[in-house]
Image (cartoon, rainbow, N blue to C red):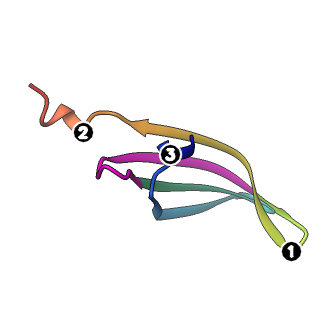
Amino acid sequence: MGAGNPVAHHVTNVFVEEIGDDRVHARSKGLGVMADGACGSVTYEDTVIRVGAQWRISHRTVLARKLPLNGLGQG
């Protein structure tokens, strides 16, 4: 994205749930701040597996939020 990349990206509200031996489901929120001050929000849904002594994301779904909950602020 070059110059279109956010100037900041924060991950917060991390929730981890064990789903099997050496496998967890992780859900978190991402907040991106652009150079012009615009912000964006996403939800990450990850499957994380243990590989040796490390944990690695094996699958990720990114859900972008385009409208506020219940459509508040629309029309």
Q: Residue at x 46, y 62 (%)?
A: 10
Q: Main secondary structure of the magenta part?
A: strand
**Which residue is identified by label 2?**
68
How far from the left and from the top, in percent, is residue 1?
A: 56, 40
CA–CA distance between discs 1 and 2?
40 Å
Does residue 22 sit above or below 1 in this rendering?
below
Does residue 53 sit above or below 24 in this rendering?
below
Check disc 2 and report its element: helix, strand or loop: loop
How far from the left and from the top, in percent, is residue 41?
A: 38, 47
Q: Is residue 50 magenta?
A: no
| Badge number at residue 53 | 1
Q: Is residue 49 left or right of residue 62?
A: right
| Badge number at residue 3 | 3
Task: Identify the amino acid type marked 2.
Answer: Pro
How far from the left and from the top, in percent, is residue 68?
A: 24, 39
| Badge number at residue 6 | none
Q: Residue at x 20, y 34 (%)?
A: 70
Q: Is residue 46 magenta?
A: yes
Magenta span of residues: 32-48
Task: Identify the amino acid type marked 3.
Answer: Ala
